[in-house]
Image (cartoon, rainbow, N blue to C red):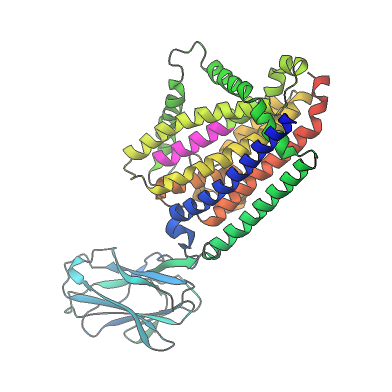
Amino acid sequence: MEKQQSEEINLRRTIITAILGYVCLVVLFYVLAGHQLHFRASRGNFSQPTAEAGTVELAQGAVVEQSFSVKIQRLQNISVQWGTYYRPNSGTVTMELINQADGSMVLSQTFDAAAITEGGTTTMTAAEPIETVYDAPLLLRIYADSQPGQGASPMMSTSAVQEGFSLSLNGEPAEGVLCFSATGEDYIWTGLHYWEFAAAFGAVLALAAALIWRRHKQGKHSYVVNVLVAMRKYRFLIRQLVSRDFKTKYKRSVLGVFWSFLNPLLTMAVQYVVFSSLFRFDQPYYQVYLIVGIVFFNFFTEATGMALGSIIGNAGLITKVYVPKYIYPLTRVLSSLVNLVISLIPLLLVTVVSGIVPTKAYLLVPFALLCLAVFSLGVGLLLAALMVFFRDVQFLWGVLSMIWMYLTPIFYPASILPEKVAWVLNVNPLYYFITFARTCFMDGISPEPVVYVQCFLMAMGALLVGALVFRKTQDRFVLYL
């Protein structure tokens, strides 16, 4: 009776803690995600086409007009590329954006022609994002008060063709498109309804907690409760196994735990020297880009590799003492997680040395780490179960993990992948975890809400598959050990 009452108290405490923790996390995430929760870079943004010729010299009386439309919900910037004839120019240049539907002036800005450089751009920036021009007929008009021989020339592309775009030079139609770009933001629907989603998910969480409590009161078996009880009952053993695995890794090593700090730095240094020379790409903060991928992928391969042999390696304990078998792959993943936390120290050092200013988005990285750990546990449970029956799994996994590494943008940007193989990224969970962390570290912002959902679903999907296979096969482990 006392044991049952103790379990009820612990379960009640766990449920209350989970619900309160959820509420705190919902509020904290809203604060940390900030602007990126509600807006994203518009999918209607378009960049400047390649400059192929000049339009006209913008002296007094000359005018360049570009008709176009944009599918941008919050227009922010219009940029134009210029040619200067490699001479100093004088006067002022005026750029105007007009809504042709009602003739209203949307945006206007004047620039000093002397400050315009060959191949440079001038950008009109709205003080507040413009929300009235989505799919509206727009006219970009450019003129100047420069004297002949002292005016700059907007550049154009004669080969670029875009539906609904038309260019006129001094009132005459011209073949081609002005070298200009338009950028802005779109609303994120999930962000606009954040509190509704949070409340709905909270209601589901409360309902699940109520069902678990009811089943427990009725004396029915609950897998969730059994796991919680096992975690509490065997917490000493879990600590000992995690400590043993971590210490064994560096046994008789001179530098010991310092290797967890040194490994990602050395790997990054070697790959940085090699790949920054072999591959021709312009990746800002490449060293940070590289070390984030290395740290995350190293954890995944280490955790799954250790979990793979966790049942075989503890055959002596399994055949003599009853302990829930999933504890063995779990402790291997937790041991690797300790190593991952240490590896974050050199990652942060490289980030700071590279000149990236830390932001509050760094506090969102633990979500990616947690999803990666859960995903690794799911894969580890699956591999540990298969390893008992098929010893060849360890060799196959070595090959598969190497292929997986090359299919994950660790040392190369995702943009260089050919279109015919780019689909691989969409089904690669590690790509989402690593990209999540890179967005926080390198851009200093929160990923879009959909990325959180993708990471969560992939982590839970792997855990569900791994746990089901492990649970279905664990009763036969002793026959093959």
**Location of residue 42 in the rendering, given as x and y in whole percent from the top left corner:** 47, 65
Q: Is residue 93 above or below residue 324?
A: below
Tell me if residue 374 can be seen: yes
Q: Is residue 135 magenta?
A: no
Magenta segment, which residues? 287-300
Q: Residue at x 67, y 41 (%)?
A: 462
The extreme top residue here reads 252
Q: Is residue 65 above or below residue 279?
A: below
Q: In this view of the protein, which residue sits in the foreground, 361 or 432?
A: 361
Q: Give residue 266's quadrant in the image.
A: top left
Q: Residue at x 66, y 44 (%)?
A: 460
Q: Is residue 2 above or below residue 13?
A: above
Q: Is residue 182 left or right of residue 323?
A: left
Q: In this view of the protein, which residue sits in the foreground, 374 or 212?
A: 212
**Location of residue 200 in the rendering, given as x and y in whole percent from the top left corner:** 63, 59
Q: Is residue 394 left or right of residue 168?
A: right
**Location of residue 105 in the rendering, given as x and y in whole percent from the top left corner:** 34, 83
Q: Main secondary structure of the magenta part?
A: helix
Q: Give residue 150's quadrant in the image.
A: bottom left
Q: Is residue 344 left or right of residue 171?
A: right
Q: In this view of the protein, which residue sits in the foreground, 338 or 400?
A: 338
Tally the marks: 0
Q: Is residue 422 above or below residue 241?
A: below
Tell me if residue 283 can be seen: no
The extreme bottom residue here reads 102
Q: Quadrant of the N terminus?
A: top right
Q: Quadrant of the C terminus?
A: top right
**Location of residue 391 in the rendering, given as x and y in whole percent from the top left corner:** 75, 23
Q: Residue at x 43, y 21 (%)?
A: 258
Q: Residue at x 59, y 19 (%)?
A: 240
